[in-house]
Image: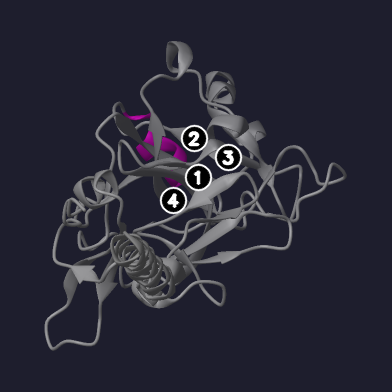
Amino acid sequence: MIQNYFFSSSFFFFVFLYSLTRFITQCSSVNPNFEACSHTTCGNQTIKYPFYIEGRQRSFCGYPGFGLICSDNGFPMLNISNYKYVIHEISYPTQSIRVSEAVISPPNATSSSSSCAIPRIYNITLDGTRFSFASNQSDLFLLFGCNLGLLPRNFRKYSVGCSAENETISVLGMPEDGGDLRYASEKCNGSLVVQTRIGNETKGGEINGDVVRRGIVLNWVVAICSLCEETGGKCGFDTNQTAYSFKCYCPDRDHALRCDPPVPD
């Protein structure tokens, strides 16, 4: 009787000890890449793959070329074509971002800034490896250095703001269709013509400074992360190999596309 009791007690003790040891081992061996790539925030925006914040997250948590800088005021900023762009909105379901050049929507802008001033911006060039223009947008041409007094009266409808250097000089925003763009580009003294885009949802074709400052929408062109996240992983990118490759960082280890389903006890 005593032997049976001793055997039974010993058996349950060893089962408990084995289970405890296994639990501690699992808890202490979480994949460090999985922990390193936890989602973070910049201002009120969640930052995760394909983006990562330089200096705060490891580069393998994002896609090459998608490193962001989080400004002191909490605005994520991205470098495109050697110019800094402020990211106003990130939509992970649609893989899109709404951006504007930092000089036109500076992250440290104050209420004392001139409400009409639109600094000179530059044509955005996309090589197709990271971003493409969203389809629901139309071309808009900005003409800097225009004197409305030297243009026909009906051209005032194109005014979207004033020059940052001289508030008496206007900035015009014009569509490509028709001859008005060609006429204005010839008449505006020293005019700089910049091609940008605006959303097709603009009411009645109305164009103003706020529409220009709202920025443009870009779609990112990288591997989709949903399958990895749906299985409990965090997406990243392995840059240590000769050929770059997508990685799914799971609690146990790195996987190619998704985490393995849990093994039944």
> Which residue in the structure is indicated by mark 1?
143
| 51 in relation to 133, above or below | below
Amino acid under disc 2: Gly
Q: Measure how far apart labels 1 and 4 are at the Cα level.
A: 5 Å
What numbered label is drawn on residue 193? 4
What residue is at 32 percent from the left and 32 percent from the top? 137
- Residue closest to the eye, 172 or 241: 241
Where is mark 3, residue-wise?
213
- Say which label, 1 or 4, has the lower sequence index: 1
Crowding around mark 2 (Cα neighbors within 10 Å: few <14, some 14 to 19, many 20+) is many
Label 3: state its secondary structure: helix
Residue 67 at x, y percent in the picture? 44, 69
Q: Which residue is mark 2?
A: 173
Q: Determine contact: label 4, label 2, CB under 8 Å.
A: no
**CB contact under 8 Å: marks 1 and 4:** yes
Q: Is residue 180 magenta?
A: yes
Question: Of discs 2 and 3, which sits in the foreground?
Answer: 3
Q: Looking at the picture, which amino acid does disc 3 mark?
A: Arg
What is the distance, in whole Å, between disc 4 and disc 2 at their CAs?
10 Å
Quick one: label 4 or label 2, which is nearer the N terminus? 2
Q: Are discs 2 and 3 less than 8 Å apart at CB?
A: no
